[in-house]
């Protein structure tokens, strides 16, 4: 457990937790990929990022890093919740279809080319390039750019299609 400074809206320090696992859990990655919306499954290095109960996890074969927590007790409760989740998933694998598609971000410049490029800041970012970088990492949705989402904007449709592709595109 370690503190990572204070959040933007609070003077209370936030915590992140890492823990080692005594079993290789990598066989569960494709199942997590199949059942958790917005999971990002990476091949090299081999790990999966996802949210469980709104908490971000980076799960590696033999360890996990999670954040953010307001105190140690919340972090410990979450680690126990995560272990229960993994044990439950392992018990259900025969009834689930694994998803082996790995996450490949859409290149920032490919996204940028489809943006209005007016740097109007209505999305909350200082420039279209910053918006493209965040969208490439799936930190935001393309609907945060009002111009892009106007009816009839073909670039908006193209971008949605690019972002929703799986396999060779993006998960
Ligand atoms: S709202 Fe759209 S056009 Fe405006 S800065 Fe953001 S991405 Fe660019």
Image (spheres, helix red, strand yellow):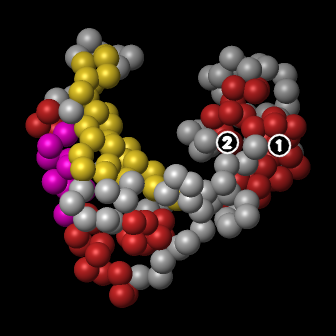
Q: Position of residue 95 (x, y in %)?
A: 37, 87
Tell me which label, 1 or 2, sits earlier in the chain.
1
- Judged left or right of residue 97, residue 94 is left
**Which quarter of the picture shows residue 7?**
top left
Secondary element under disc 1, as helix, strand or loop, is helix
Task: Say whether residue 79 is magenta.
Answer: yes
Q: Which residue in the protein does label 1 denote?
A: 110
- Judged left or right of residue 62, residue 128 is right
Residue in view at x 56 percent, y 59 percent:
43
Is residue 70 or residue 3 the one in the foreground?
3
Query: Which residue extends farthest left?
Result: 73
**Which quarter of the picture shows residue 131?**
top right
The span picked out in magenta is 75-84
For marks 1 and 2, give the CA distance: 9 Å
Residue in view at x 47 percent, y 70 percent:
30
Q: Position of residue 75 (x, y in %)?
A: 19, 39
Is residue 25 or residue 156 the one in the foreground?
25
């Amino acid at each position: 457990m370690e503190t990572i400074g204070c959040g933007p809206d609070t003077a209370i320090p936030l915590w992140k937790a890492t823990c080692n696992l005594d079993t290789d859990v990598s066989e569960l990655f494709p199942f997590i990929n199949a059942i958790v919306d917005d999971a990002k499954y990476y091949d090299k290095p081999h790990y999966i990022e996802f949210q469980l109960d709104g908490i971000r996890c980076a799960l590696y074969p033999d360890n996990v890093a999670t954040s953010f927590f307001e105190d140690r007790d919340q972090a410990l409760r979450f680690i126990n919740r995560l272990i229960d989740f993994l044990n439950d998933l392992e018990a259900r694998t025969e009834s689930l279809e694994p998803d082996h598609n790995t996450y490949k971000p859409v290149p920032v410049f490919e996204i940028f080319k489809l943006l209005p490029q007016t740097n109007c800041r209505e999305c909350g970012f200082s420039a279209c390039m910053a918006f493209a970088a965040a969208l490439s990492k799936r930190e935001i949705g393309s609907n945060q750019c009002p111009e892009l989402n106007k009816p009839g904007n073909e670039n908006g449709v193209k971008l949605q299609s690019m972002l929703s592709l799986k396999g060779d595109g993006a998960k």
